[in-house]
Image: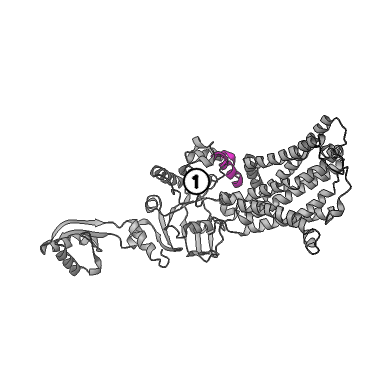
């Protein structure tokens, strides 16, 4: 597994697609989630209507709301990017046939995949750290520019927020990785993952959110559970939004952990069993 | 250099017993294959396209699971870390990361194989790729890709080297260079299992040959043994008048041993009878303008063997 992890680290570091994905995540988060929001709410258009005044809404981008704002923003774009990252990491190996080059070296199939998993865990950890750090810096700069004051979240909240972000990134990356192994096609893995995310979780989840029976099924979906975890971190100017959540944050966390384990085990089972290069 | 020790019973680098692969589509790609590759030899695995060569090599490398049968490769079960540690393989196409340079690709493979980084430069040199090692794999020509594939297979300095169609897609110059490289690779007692559909390649590089057709091993032996097994040599005679010569030859030999094509008789007889046949033809007023022995080419043998699959030969 260590040999595989060392090989993965070289591949991951030198793959431009990974850096581009990370760049997209960071750029959209900082630009759209922070700079644009700040500029618009600092100079609200004349037709701006909101029960909460713009000067209060603006506090969303200040340090006091760091964790809920990052989690809310990354819950879609971050999720999509992590599915792509996971899908690329495994499906590309089949697309380039490099999986057969790897599997005729020394490590067992389990060791090869566990090395890849460990690398993805490290990547998602680093992405979570850098994302939080970059948004914290941007938030601080915007606060300074605005000439206002704001408090930083407590260490506990920061730590919990970081944990939630990493867990969600890891779950969706594992999902993408599983799809890559199951479909053996980059297009199918990414297409399937994003379709599930935007149609399965978002569209159907919203339409049938209050339909009895379906609601019970929705309670088990990873996106719904991630949403419940995110909602437990509240914006300072809003009341807790827990009543609209189908599950509470604790159950959400446990369900996400269960998904992480399930995706990993399934990926391992498929990777170990299936022939490579069969027709 | 002293011969490498395979640590194998009976000196076999590869042994299969009843190896069979039936795909989920129902296609029987390999059928009851019994293969024995001796330690230290260059073994040519010969067969037409679609005969089951690559499927067999994939099973030997642990990429495919056999439907039935067993195999021992480099002293271990195919695909087991013990077996993989002692073999290097390039199966089908050389597959590498297009965004990495040749050198970085080998570093990645070396890390997987647990081989020190210092092995990369010697193998690049061995396949004459040092000058282009810093360029991205996606810019490589077919020949360079093949050489990088061989370099990757050599990283572990393996006792057994499996190469699947190593000259596929190469130009004549590249083919000659690859053949020379393969000849060098056997030094030190290394076993090479080489698959090909190119008869000339196998004839020039291999000690022994196994011929596979429709998933079955139809013959195995040295090139000379295979020639002999398929009838060996023939006597070629050009004589006129043709009708008279044919009547005479068919009365002298059995009609089944006389074939005529483009005015040239091919006689399936021992070449030592040439003088006697010549005397008899001349005595009967037939003019003999050409009389020579023809060695049957490996191509003839191959076509004979692969047109009608029979039971396993040895």
x, y percent for residue A244: 84, 54
In-image side of B267 versus B1 (left or right): left
Q: Can residue A261 be seen in the rendering of this structure? A: no
In-image side of A144 versus A111 (left or right): right
x, y percent for residue B138: 53, 42
Judge whether residue A3 is colored magenta: no
**Quadrant of the rendered structure where residue B83 is?**
bottom right
Q: Can residue B8 be seen in the rendering of this structure? A: yes
Residue found 59% across the figure and 43% down from its top: B108
In-image side of A137 versus B202 (left or right): right
Closer to us: A257 or B3 = A257
Magenta: predominant secondary structure element?
helix
Closer to us: B67 or B170 = B170
Closer to us: A129 or B156 = A129
Its colouring scheme is: one colour
Question: Would you place residue A262 above or below residue A139 in this image?
Answer: below
Give the residues drawn in magenta, as a range.
B99-118
Judge whether residue B109 is colored magenta: yes
**Quadrant of the rendered structure where residue A131 is?**
top right
Closer to us: A69 or A9 = A69
> Mark 1 packing: few (<14 Cα in 10 Å), some, or many (20+)?
many
Name the residue carrying label 1. Answer: B150
In-image side of B59 versus A54 (left or right): left
Residue found 49% across the figure and 56% down from its top: B54
State the quadrant of the C terminus of chain B.
bottom left
Residue found 71% across the figure and 38% down from its top: A27
x, y percent for residue A121: 72, 47
Badge 1 element:
helix
Mark 1 — on which chain does it sit?
B
x, y percent for residue A182: 63, 57
């Amino acid at each position: 597994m260590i040999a595989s992890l060392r090989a993965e680290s070289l591949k991951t570091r030198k793959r431009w697609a990974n850096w581009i994905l990370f760049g997209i995540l960071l750029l959209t988060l900082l630009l759209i989630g922070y700079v644009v929001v700040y500029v618009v709410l600092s100079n609200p258009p004349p037709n701006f209507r909101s029960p909460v005044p713009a000067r209060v809404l603006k506090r969303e981008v200040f340090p006091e709301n760091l964790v809920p704002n990052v989690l809310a923003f990354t819950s879609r774009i971050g999720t999509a990017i992590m599915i792509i990252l996971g899908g690329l990491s495994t499906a590309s190996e089949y697309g380039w046939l490099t999986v057969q080059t790897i599997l005729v070296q020394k490590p067992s199939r389990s060791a090869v995949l566990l090395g890849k998993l460990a690398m993805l865990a490290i990547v998602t950890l680093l992405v979570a750290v850098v994302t939080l750090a970059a948004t914290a810096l941007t938030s601080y700069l915007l606060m300074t520019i605005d000439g206002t004051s704001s408090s930083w979240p407590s260490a506990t909240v920061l730590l919990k927020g970081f944990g939630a972000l990493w867990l969600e990134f890891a779950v969706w990356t594992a999902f993408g990785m599983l799809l890559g192994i199951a479909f053996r096609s980059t297009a199918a893995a990414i297409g399937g993952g994003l379709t599930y995310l935007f149609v399965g979780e978002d569209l159907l989840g919203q339409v049938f959110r209050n339909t009895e029976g379906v609601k019970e099924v929705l309670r088990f979906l990873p996106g719904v559970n991630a949403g419940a975890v995110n909602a437990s971190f509240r914006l300072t100017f809003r009341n807790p939004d827990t009543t609209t959540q189908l599950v509470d944050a604790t159950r959400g966390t446990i369900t996400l952990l269960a998904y992480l384990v399930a995706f990993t085990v399934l990926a391992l089972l498929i990777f170990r069993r299936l022939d490579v290069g069969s027709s | 250099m002293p011969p490498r020790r395979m640590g194998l019973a009976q000196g076999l680098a590869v042994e299969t017993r009843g190896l069979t692969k039936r795909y989920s589509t129902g296609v029987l790609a390999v059928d009851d294959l019994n293969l024995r590759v001796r330690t230290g030899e260059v073994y040519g695995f010969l067969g037409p396209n679609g005969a089951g060569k690559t499927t067999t090599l994939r099973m030997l490398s642990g990429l495919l699971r056999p439907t039935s049968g067993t195999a021992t490769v480099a002293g271990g079960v195919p695909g087991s870390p013990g077996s993989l540690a002692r073999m290097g393989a390039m199966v089908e196409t050389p597959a590498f990361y297009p965004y990495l340079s040749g050198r970085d690709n080998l570093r990645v493979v070396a890390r997987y194989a647990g081989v020190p980084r210092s092995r990369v430069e010697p193998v690049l040199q061995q396949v004459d790729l040092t000058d282009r090692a810093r360029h991205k794999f996606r810019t490589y020509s077919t020949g360079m890709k093949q050489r990088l594939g061989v370099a990757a297979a050599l990283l572990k300095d393996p006792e057994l080297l499996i190469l699947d169609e190593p000259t596929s897609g190469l130009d004549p110059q590249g083919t000659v260079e690859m053949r020379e490289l393969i000849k060098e690779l056997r030094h030190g007692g290394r076993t090479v299992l080489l698959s090909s559909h190119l008869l000339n390649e196998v004839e020039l590089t291999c000690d022994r040959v196994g011929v596979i057709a429709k998933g079955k091993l139809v013959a195995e032996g040295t090139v000379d043994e295979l020639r002999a097994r398929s009838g060996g040599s023939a006597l070629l005679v050009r004589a006129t008048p043709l009708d008279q010569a044919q009547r005479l030859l068919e009365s002298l030999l059995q009609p089944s041993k006389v074939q005529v094509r483009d005015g040239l008789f091919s006689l399936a007889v021992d070449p030592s009878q040439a003088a006697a046949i010549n005397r008899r033809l001349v005595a009967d007023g037939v003019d003999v303008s050409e009389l020579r022995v023809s060695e049957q080419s490996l191509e003839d043998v191959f076509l004979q063997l692969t047109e009608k699959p029979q039971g396993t030969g040895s």
